[in-house]
Structure formats: C-alpha cells, structure tokens
Amino acid sequence: MILSTIKQIFSTFKDLFKSGKYFLLNSLVEKLVYFVFFALLARMMVPEFYGQIIAVNAFSNILSSFFEFGLGFYIQREAAISHDKTDKIVATSIIIKIIGFFIIIPIVIIYFHNSSISILLILALSLINYLVSSFSIFTGMLFGMQKFNRVFLSLLKARIIFLLLIALTFVLSPRFEYLISALFISTIFYGYYIVKEAFQFIKPELIKNIGLADIYSLIKLAAPFGLGVMFVWIYDRVDVLFLEKFVGLKAVADYSVAYSVYKLPMILSGIILMPWYSKMSKEFSLKKRIEITEIINVGGILIFIATVFILCFVLGGGEIIGLIFGGRYETSAWILALLSVTLPGLFMNNLTGVTLNAIKKEKYQAYGTLIGLILNIILGIYTIYYWGIFGALLTTIMTEYMVFFSQFIFLFKHRKSFV
C-alpha cells in the first residue's frame, strides 16, 4: 500500500516535471539573476545601506500588489479554458497597469525621499518591481496557452544581457549603481521580448476600444485573485518594514539574507504547481470535479521537498549563506534554521490556495490570506517591537501555518468539488 502510494506520487512528479520543465528553467534563471543581484549588492554595501535597499524593494513590491489585481492568474485560467476573450482581457489589463504606474511610483519616491538612497535609485528599484509585476499579464496568458517555452526564451535572452552588463561593470568599475542599472536595462528588454511574443496571439489594437466599464468589469472578476495575491505580498514583506522601524537597518539586512535563501525552494514548488494549476483548471471546467488523489500526490511531493530543504538549511545554513552573501552574514544561519520550519506550511498553503483558484473558489483563497495578513500585522507589530528578529521569525511561522489551516477548512467546506 505504502509502496504503491510512493510510486504514484513519483509518477505524478515525473508528469508535472515534464509539463513544467520550461517553468522550471524560467524559475531557475530568474532566481539565479536575483540571487546574483542581491548577493553582489550585499557584498558591495555595508549592511545598513543594504538594509535600506531591501526596505525600498519591499515597500515598492507591497504597493505594486495593490494594482496586481490577480490579473496574471485570472488571465492564465481563462486562457487555459478558452482563447475567445483573451484579447480584451489583456488589453484592459494593460490600461489598468498604466494607470497604476502614475499612482504607485510617486508614492514610493515620496515615502523614501529623506532616506540615504538617491531618488534615481529609488525610481529604478520601483520601476523594476512594477514592470515585472505588469509583465505577469503576458506570462499568465502564455502559461495558460501552454506556451511555457516562449516565456522562458524571452526571459533567458533578457537575463543574458544582464549577466553581460554585470561582466562589463566589473571589468570597468564595480559599483552598485551600475549593478542596479544592469537589472533595469535587462527588465526593459524582457518586457520587449515578452510583449512581442504575446502580441502574436492577441490583437493589441483593442486597447483603443477599452472603456471604464471594461476596466470595472475585469477588476470585479479578477479581484478575488488580486486580493489573495495582495495579501500574500504584504504579509511576505511587511516584516522588513517593521524591522526597519523598530530595530534597525542592520537587522533588516541579516533577516533578509536568511529569508531570501529560505525562499529558494519555491522554485521547485512553482514548477510543480504552475502546470498543475492549468491542468486542474481545465479539468474542473470540463468535469466540475477534481480527483482528490491529484491533490494528495502533489502534497506528498511538496512535503518531501520541504523535508530535504529543512535538513539542508539546519545542517549547512551558515555555509550556504556565507558562500552566497559573504562571511559577514554567516551569523544569519540561526535565522535560516528557524525559518526552515515554515517550509511545509508554506508549500501546503500554496497548494490549497492554487486548488481553491482551480475550482473557482478564489474568494476563499483571498479569505485565507486575509486571515494570515491580519495575524501577521497584529502579531508582527507586537513581537518585532519587543523581540526583534525572533519576533519576525515567530510571526512568519505562525502566519504561513494559519493560512494553510484556513484554506484547508475552506477546501473541506467545498469537498463536493472533489471525487
């Protein structure tokens, strides 16, 4: 019985890996680029200044989430089911993102205008985050159409440009300003490539026919996805802002280094859940049911991966951090070891959230993440104020498991959607 179950789980993993190989490569390239970027920044800067960079990055990501509206996930689901409405949805999404640009970027600049970072750097970091968030419109559409290879090749070409610019920077003059400029230029190229690919399948001229009624209608439809994404982005990053206010920029740097390593396993989680989400969305649309064994098999894979990474982070966290970010941050190993306890909860809340979206109960996914956000903010303000980094750790652990528990209850409530 046990051997049969294990065999079935690994068979599921093999199928998902095969269908998600381009998403795997996409995630690996993106994670590699951002790891190189932040690792080099950490090595070039004193921890306090690096902490300020992380704070700007966190704040701009949080604000970007307010205009995310879950458009990427919504478009992916709709494109996976039918291509009939994709053109108009994408065109309307572009208008929404343009409006958001003129609201979010000025807010970030005003918020940090008294910081030690120049306005140009703040603008560059904010634009990178907002543009990448906006490109999810096109990646979501292409993912839904099973065009994973086109997304990967667009990203690969842009990030090769980034690596070449980094190499040039270190040959001429290794400065962190040039490093940020290299990522910004690479992001612009990524936008060009991904938009070019997407426009092969849609009619961009529809943009001129989009009105306020279309914008309102799309936001209303995608809002449950967007709220869930926004809540996750906020509780995933707000700890950094609390640490900045209550403890200091050195604590932000130490915590963020460990947190970025802790998030590495999300690469594998993504390559499993992204193609699985498209597959389950289509299956539910056709059959109005999802086989529960599909969820159990994927859950088993995720728990196994989480266990492996927990062992790696507990036993070799210091060496991993030192290798990537430099010896000055090796003391963050204890933070990584405690954060690793959260991995099973993180993976499971991703699985339950994706399942709720697939069965068109996205509002319950939003409820689950809202519960996590409320707990995160209330607990975070108190624990970080009094206990600093340990408070941030406790808040993160409790938040991820609370989101999983909440979403599991909602899935149980709608158990008739499973066979």
Image (spheres, grey):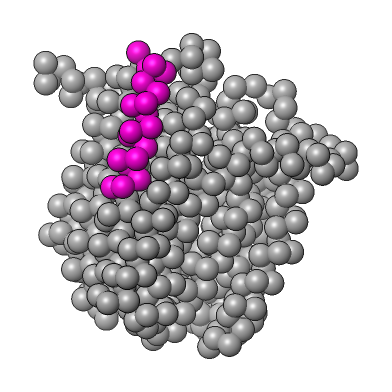
Q: Is residue 180 left or right of residue 189?
A: left
Q: Position of residue 286 (x, y in %)?
A: 53, 13
Q: Position of residue 276 (x, y in %)?
A: 42, 29
Q: Residue at x 61, y 84 (%)?
A: 113
Q: Nearer the viewer, residue 363 or 271?
A: 363
* Image: 78 above or below 311: above
Q: Residue at x 24, y 42 (%)?
A: 305
Q: Residue at x 70, y 38 (%)?
A: 218
Count the numbered circles shown: 0
Q: Quadrant of the C terminus?
A: top left
Q: Is residue 90 left or right of residue 261?
A: right
Q: Quadrant of residue 89?
A: top right
Q: Inspect the magenta stretch and tell me whether residue 290 lies in it.
A: no
* Image: 3 above or below 275: above
Q: Quadrant of residue 297?
A: top left
Q: Is residue 294 left or right of residue 341?
A: right
* Image: 313 above or below 387: above
Q: Position of residue 403 (x, y in %)?
A: 35, 45
Q: Nearer the viewer, residue 115 or 192?
A: 115
Query: What are the residue bounds of the magenta stretch?
Result: 401-419
Dominant secondary structure (helix, strand or loop) of the stretch shown in magenta: helix
Q: Residue at x 59, y 36 (%)?
A: 74
Q: Nearer the viewer, residue 339 or 125?
A: 339
Q: Quadrant of the N terminus?
A: top left
> Is residue 21 visible to us here?
no
Q: Quadrant of residue 293?
A: top left
